[in-house]
Amino acid sequence: MPQPQPWHAVAGRLIDVAMGRAPADTVIRNGRWVNVHSGEIIPGTDVAIAAGRFAYVGLDAAHTIGPATKIIDAAGRYLVPGLCDAHMHVESGMVTVTEFARAVIPHGTTSMFIDPHEIANVLGLTGVKLMHDEAASLPVNVFVQVPSCVPSAPGLETPGATLGPAEVAEAMCWPGIIGLGEVMNFPGVVAGDAKMLAEMAATSAAGKTIGGHYASPDLGCAFHAYAAGGPADDHEGTRAEDAIARVRQGMRAMLRLGSAWYDVAAQVKAITESGLESRNFILCTDDSHSGTLVRDGHMNRVVRHAIAQGLKPMTAIQMATLNTAQHFGLERELGSITPGRRADIVLTSDLISLPVDMVIARGNVLAEHGKLTVDIAPHAYPAFARQTMHMGRHIAAADFDIAAPHGANSVTARVIGVIENQAPTRALERTLPVHEGTVMMDRVGDVCQIALVERHQGTGGVVNAFVSGFGYTADCAVASTVAHDSHHMIVVGTNKADMAQAANRLGEVGGGIVVISGGRELALVPLPIAGLMSDQRAEVVAGQADQLIAAMHSCGCQLNNAVMQHSLLALVVIPELRISDNGLIDVTKFARTDLFV
């Protein structure tokens, strides 16, 4: 589907429609206009649309109606700007950009700002270009940020590809690029790292937005230095003081509600209790599971949640529309129902529960009552994007043995501690028994093994450590090639034979997520595209994901959306403790640490 024509190219027609000299393509009559600029709700409003843009918004658009004009009766429903997701990763939905759009359009999302750093870690700039070009074919607005940190932490992990200033500068010339993706290497920025400074300089020279990612509770000099470096927003806050600090330093605070990250409730108090100006706050999802998208919603879910935390409906809607558009320099294109903007609009009967009755994007009706009304054809990925599992060898149960120090009867081990509904982990210490020279797990104490299996260069490497918090009580293993950000394979389990079977199974199917228990495969989500995305419809993937979660529950795991927690265990830019192909990483020091204390 072609991209919308520039405003200036159709301005003459918009003027003629507004004056009644030419007919509109579509007129929406008798709506309640949610005006995010003025903060008003204006009843009895008509909206005239031409060339995919708003031409007239006022009390009576009868003069714009011609014989072929399509009439939509809003019947007093609210007219809300199409919702925007300011920061997200399509790959986390385990579907392609096309399937992600199919899933979220019925929920009222018409604009997405995506950072494809997952596929970049596997396929490099070529992978980014694949998603950029796919995004350009869709009937909604999908803007792409160039991944800034591939790898996310140089020297601490080895991805399948790397990006640097030259690649960033090259991509800045692509038409769908909106800015630089989240700058996760915040220690690099603070230290004045030449690579990070060059990437931010290239973005600034292109007049585009630098995305932030300051995953530290330290709001002292390091935070101030990060803000001075150029990132314009940040979504890693978890406390009200985090949001306040960012806004005070001229950054936009992005408050996220994903499938497993619940950071809105605490941070929104910066507005509801501390009284900060809401125009510098933005809502986003960051990571959404396919099941969440299909059943619970997308940005409409986030807006509902924000309202439930005490925000006025108008404020919450502004934070998911106009504020986002302004942040990315797109106020004249998106974010409001006003003349010249792209005709993206949601009809809803209630601003609090936000049922989505109709979704219009670029003037076309795409969904009604939760169902797509148009066909959006699947997108085919080339063969090389499906051939990314390079494990080098068959994995055996013995690969997961952890040797104890000579003569030890027990050890004190560093253990990755999972925190439910949050991205950070805890650095725990646990005493573990030793049997015949091998350190044992402690199922009663909720300590099982975690392993990273290298899958990009075929080295056959396996790194072992311990993790707590999943609550597995049965013999089981969960393996995933969705392992932010380097996307090697992460295997967590209580039984080494199951761990080996799980790893080898993903090698067979080209990547994905699998649950094995007692030698039996309980659930599998094949993700053949870069080991990250399915080639199936979102509804199919959601069903597979349901089976996955049910299988994890049957093994004793009761965490909310534990798949998302599992996928972040190698994310070596968020404290406190992670695993990488280089070993166990202390993210408070950005250095490798010993497994044993």
Image (tube, rainbow, N blue to C red):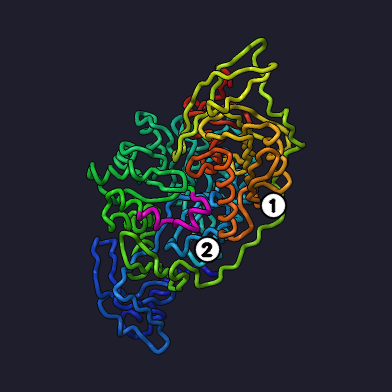
Quick check: 374 left or right of 478?
left
Helix, strand or loop status at disc 1:
helix
Please indicate, yes or no, whether residue 164 appears anywhere in the rendered image. no
On the rendered image, what quadrant is the C terminus found in? top right
Q: Residue at x 64, y 46 (%)?
A: 522
Where is mark 2, residue-wise? 102
Circle on res. 402: none
Q: Position of residue 193 (x, y in %)?
A: 50, 32
Q: Is residue 593 magenta?
A: no
For the stretch drawn in magenta, the main secondary structure is: helix
Q: Quadrant of residue 296?
A: bottom left
Q: Nearer the viewer, mark 1 or mark 2?
A: 2
The 10 Å Cα crowd at callout 2, few under 14, some 14 to 19, many 20 or more, is many
Q: The N terminus is located in which quarter?
A: bottom right
Q: Nearer the viewer, residue 457 or 360?
A: 360
Q: Position of residue 290 (x, y in %)?
A: 53, 54
Which span is picked out in magenta? 288-304
Q: Position of residue 11 (x, y in %)?
A: 38, 74
Q: Is residue 240 left or right of residue 561?
A: left
Question: Of marks 1 and 2, which one's residue comes earlier in the chain?
Answer: 2
Name the amino acid type tagged 2.
Arg
Please tell me whether residue 204 is drawn above or below residue 331 in the rendered image: above
Instruction: Give the quadrant of residue 534.
Output: bottom right
For image coordinates 69% across by 57% down, the residue present is: 382
Spot the residue most to the top.
Answer: 407
Mark-to-mark CA distance, 1 and 2: 22 Å
Q: Is residue 295 magenta?
A: yes
Which residue was labeled with disc 1? Answer: 386
